[in-house]
Image: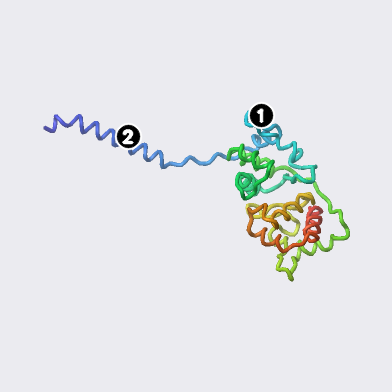
Amino acid sequence: MNRAFSPLLQTLFVALLAVTSLAHAADVKTPPAKADPAKGEALYTNGDNNRNIVACVSCHGAAGNSTITQNPRLAGQHEAYIAKQLTNFRTPERNNAVMSPMAKALSDEDIKNLAAYLVTQAPKPGAAKNKDTIDLGKQIFRGGIASKNVPACAGCHSPNGAGIPAQYPRLAGQHQDYSVAQLTAFRGGTRSNSAQMTTIAERLSDKEIKAVADYIAGLR
């Protein structure tokens, strides 16, 4: 009897081993691919016609130093922040007629590569333009507005506007027009990917937003 069933038992045992091996292989997670700045640079500079991805350089300038004041300077921006924003552009949290379609066309790998490239680029300095509001902007950025419960921007974005990697973005040298637009969007609810910034922006007047945006542009 044992001889008659021996081949069958052997077959079942081999099959069981195969199933166990497959299950183990499924549990082993492949480590995420390391970001490739060279690929990020190629995509940033050239885009990808096959996927209808326009070259980032056309709006954000060579090496992330935008010369169009409505478009942000990205050079030297923290990797985690760029990756988060591009991911958010795929969602209603940061819906944008230009950036949302672009972000949806990018793969997660593309996003990591772009962020890895941009963080290594040297940012060009900006400049404050309005001498009449520079003191107000400085006060808001460094000390906040106690009467409105507005915290100092420097507390999160650092005194020189360099930000804190993986937590808060670099602001130094950012275009005034762009900073004004984003603070206004936070205040109005059209940008909703930071509850903290929404709360702060809701307490700022137009004059205060413009003053702090101008001050930020002159930080280095």
Q: How far apart are marks 1 and 2 (CA)?
A: 44 Å
Percent position of residue 94, x then y? 64, 49
Front in this rendered view, residue 186 or 28 = 186
Question: Measuring 69% from the left and 34% from the top, which residue is drawn there?
Answer: 54
Left or right relative to 160: residue 15: left
Query: From the image, which quarter does the N terminus lie in?
Result: top left
Q: Which label number is shown at residue 18?
A: 2
The residue where tag 1 is placed is: 49
Residue extending furthest toward the right: 131
Q: In this view, does 54 lie above or below 208?
A: above
In the depicted structure, whether residue 124 falls above or below residue 46: below
Label 1 packing within 10 angstroms: few (<14), some (14-19), many (20+): few
Left or right: 31 in relation to 102: left
**Which one is nearer the viewer's eye here, 56 or 52?**
52
Q: Are marks 1 and 2 in contact (CB under 8 Å)?
A: no
Q: Which residue lies furthest to the bottom in this view?
A: 147
Q: In this view, does 133 lie to the left or right of 178?
A: right
Hey, which quadrant is residue 207 in on the image? bottom right
Q: What residue is at 71 percent from the left and 65 percent from the top?
A: 151
The amino acid at mark 2 is Ala
Q: What residue type is labelled 1?
A: Asn
Q: In which quarter of the image is residue 132?
A: bottom right
Which structural element holds mark 2?
A: helix
Q: Give the quadrant of residue 28.
A: top left
Q: Is mark 1 on a helix, strand or loop?
A: helix
Q: Earlier in the sequence, mark 1 or mark 2?
A: 2
Task: Give x and y (percent) for residue 200.
Answer: 69, 62
